[in-house]
């Protein structure tokens, strides 16, 4: 029965969530926290207005539509859109955004979940948008169980300027760390009590970002935060090996768009290529140049590529050959810098991943578990069923079930 429940939770239609968003949008607009706190430190709040509010009946309806009607909905849920300061790719101070959700009317201090979202090229398809399905779904379940949830949009998305540095571990981690800082301050301003427990979770790119955040907190900020548990799911932790090799050898229908996104993003971060013509065949070289220059958005560029493009028709054969054969190719070397499996974790980790995932190969989690365990980390790999999309709901529910066992 529990397996059936998990599977039914995956069937969340876009219409259902958009209807929910329409219902909450009218509840927002005013702020009940200070919206002009100009803090020069990272994590300083620029604004944190109330973006939406769900009543208990709306939360119950959302859970029902997710196939989780037997779960209680004891609280109203408030959503605050947080605009805050963080650090950019070059170490400069930049503006970022995210969403904080928390239940109202709880009896004691709340644990916090930092949730890292999956791949998005659309600037507004992120947690700070009240119609964003992934975060609405998570908040409805987690807040009903008594968690506060903070979710960063990442750099270049939401209310952050520029191009998103896709799968750039350093800025994924810093944007999320500073979102946690800002969210804790918003809660303090609103009188929402938090305990010291911090849980980390994310799916797909969010799995990669979760691992990066965990590493950053324990490596450099253990005096400020203690990770209680971490649940990265379906993430490309072995970018330079498993992920790249599978993309070149057995590309999925979405691989060309993922690689386009990654290569354009890495060019803006690392200045890898003298010209996009050495990487992409026409007309994709021009498309990449225009996207990198900001003449069109990555969402528009990826929309022009579509899902039917063959990788061999997009990339230059000489580039593919060099990338596949040279272990020190500049692109592979930069990917290696963003691998996230060769470190020691203190807090326990559970890796959730479908063995049938065609977008982010399961071997990423096999490699990560082996490497982390070899360094003395406590890591459990939990195999799931289904494809990359359908396994996400199962990962979410199993993650929350595990977290529930650790809440104090």
Image (cartoon, helix red, strand yellow):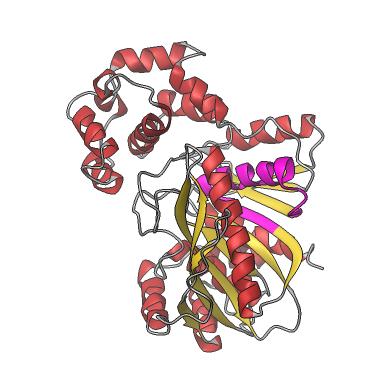
Q: Is 163 placed above or below 160 here?
A: above
Q: Is residue 50 visible?
A: yes
Whole-percent x, y for residue 330 in the image: 45, 18
The one nearer the camera, 97 or 95, is 95
Q: Is 66 placed above or below 74 here?
A: above
Q: Is residue 234 visible?
A: no
Whole-percent x, y for residue 14 in the image: 37, 67
Identify the residue at image location x=53%, y=78%: 33
Whole-percent x, y for residue 118 in the image: 48, 51
Whole-percent x, y for residue 31 in the image: 47, 80
Region of the chain picked out in magenta, as a range: 199-227
Q: Classify residue 400 as left or right of residue 319.
A: right
Q: Is 22 placed above or below 286 here?
A: below
Q: Classify residue 140 as left or right of residue 312.
A: right
Q: Classify residue 274 as left or right of residue 131.
A: left
Q: Magenta stretch: residue 311 in it?
A: no
Q: Is 297 placed above or below 323 here?
A: below
Q: Magenta stretch: residue 213 in it?
A: yes
Identify the residue at image location x=65%, y=62%: 113
Pick the quarter of the image with the C terminus.
bottom right
The one nearer the camera, 353 or 29, is 29
Q: How many marks?
A: 0
The one nearer the camera, 120 or 194, is 194
The one nearer the camera, 188 or 278, is 188
Pick the quarter of the image with the N terminus.
bottom right
Identify the residue at image location x=31%, y=12%: 318
Image-quadrant location for residue 26? bottom left
Q: Classify residue 403 as left or right of residue 156.
A: right
């Amino acid at each position: 029965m529990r397996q059936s429940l998990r599977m039914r939770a995956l069937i969340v239609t876009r219409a259902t969530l958009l209807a929910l968003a329409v219902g909450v949008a009218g509840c927002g607009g005013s702020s009940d926290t200070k919206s002009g706190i100009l803090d020069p430190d990272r994590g300083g709040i620029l604004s944190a207005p109330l973006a939406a509010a769900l009543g208990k009946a709306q939360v119950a309806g959302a859970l029902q539509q997710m196939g989780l009607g037997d779960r209680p909905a004891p609280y109203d849920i408030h959503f605050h859109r947080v605009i805050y300061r963080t650090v950019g790719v070059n170490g400069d101070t930049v503006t970022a955004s995210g969403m904080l959700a928390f239940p109202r009317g709880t009896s004691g201090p709340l644990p916090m979940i930092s949730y890292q979202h999956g791949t998005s090229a659309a600037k507004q398809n992120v947690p700070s948008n009240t119609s964003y399905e992934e975060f609405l779904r998570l908040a409805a379940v987690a807040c009903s169980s008594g968690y506060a949830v903070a979710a960063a949009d990442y750099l270049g998305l939401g209310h952050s300027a520029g191009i998103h540095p896709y799968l750039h571990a350093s800025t994924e981690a810093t944007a999320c760390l500073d979102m946690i800082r800002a969210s804790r301050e918003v809660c303090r301003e609103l009188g929402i009590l938090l305990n010291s427990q911090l849980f980390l979770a994310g799916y797909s790119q969010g799995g990669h970002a979760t691992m990066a955040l965990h590493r950053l907190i324990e490596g450099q900020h253990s005096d400020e935060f203690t990770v209680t548990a971490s649940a990265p799911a379906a993430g490309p932790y072995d970018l330079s090996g498993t992920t790249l090799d599978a993309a070149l050898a057995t590309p999925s229908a979405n691989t060309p768009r993922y690689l386009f996104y990654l290569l354009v993003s890495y060019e803006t971060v690392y200045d890898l290529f003298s010209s996009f013509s050495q990487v992409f065949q026409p007309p994709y070289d021009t498309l990449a140049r225009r996207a990198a220059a900001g003449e069109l958005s990555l969402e528009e560029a990826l929309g022009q590529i579509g899902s039917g493009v063959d990788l061999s028709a997009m990339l230059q054969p000489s580039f593919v050959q060099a990338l596949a054969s040279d272990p020190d190719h500049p692109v592979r070397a930069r990917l290696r810098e963003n691998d996230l499996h060769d470190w020691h974790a203190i807090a326990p980790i559970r890796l959730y991943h479908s063995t049938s995932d065609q977008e982010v190969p399961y071997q990423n989690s096999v490699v990560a578990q082996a490497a982390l365990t070899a360094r003395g980390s406590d890591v459990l790999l939990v195999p799931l069923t289904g494809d990359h999309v359908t396994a996400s709901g199962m990962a979410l529910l199993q993650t929350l079930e595990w977290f529930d066992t650790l809440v104090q």
